[in-house]
Image: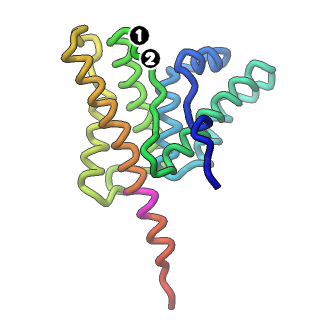
Amino acid sequence: MSLDNDSLHLPKYDDFVQSISVLALTMSASELHGIMCGYLCAGADSQGEAYIRALLNNRKDEQSRHALLSMFSVFSISQQQINNFDFEFQMLLPDDNESLVMRAQAFSEWCEGFTQGLTIAGVGMEQFYEEESQDALQHLIEFAEMDCESLEVGEEDEQALMEVSEYTRMAVLRLHSDLVLHERELGDSGTTH
């Protein structure tokens, strides 16, 4: 079965922000997406779904249902992107036409959410088998603590943000590969007595 590539694209950042605004969450859309991806990277898909449901806090009005559908759509798209091996994984971040500081802040929040999602799913540094994966996770933790206010709006910082964003995108796929795929290999090999 082949997946329709058009269905694997996240919505525009502003559209997603608008669709979940009714929930008045205490986190940004980027951080929320990072949390979702942290769960997915950890192979804790059902925990991620439960987390999204908990955000609704038993609200059943039409706008809340629309927000829930929007979140589940983003979750499902990210799930497919992370589990496919075509390197199409995307982070839900503001468009390039937004200010550098806003984009850097959203990127930092995404990394914070991602590391939180891993932690909530019970994954720590010690669960990663490869040293490169441990280094990648440490870098994401550092990116979450980035001082966005000190950025200068210039070509050098623009380039740096683009590079760390691409590094992060690939790091997520590496972490998923190390963690989830290694666990699957162990499960498939099994032990027979």
Residue at 62% from the left image edge and 14% from the top image edge: 18
Q: Which residue matches tag 1?
A: 98
Is residue 140 left or right of 36 when viewed as pictured?
Answer: left
Q: x%, y% of residue 125? A: 32, 50
x and y percent of residue 175 in the render?
Answer: 37, 49
Is 88 on the left-hand or right-hand side of 134? right
**Which residues lie in the magenta part?**
178-182
In the rendered view, does 67 fall on the left or right side of 47?
right
Q: Are marks 2 and 1 in contact (CB under 8 Å)?
A: yes
Q: Is residue 187 above or below residue 102?
A: below
Of 70 and 154, the residue lying toward us = 154
Q: How is the image coloured?
A: rainbow
Tell me the distance, in whole angstroms, between the alpha carbons under discs 2 and 1: 6 Å
- Using the image, tell me which numbered label, if any, was put on residue 95: 2
Q: Quadrant of residue 165?
A: top left
Q: Amino acid at mark 2?
A: Asp
Q: Amino acid at mark 1?
A: Glu
Q: Residue at x 30, y 25 (%)?
A: 162
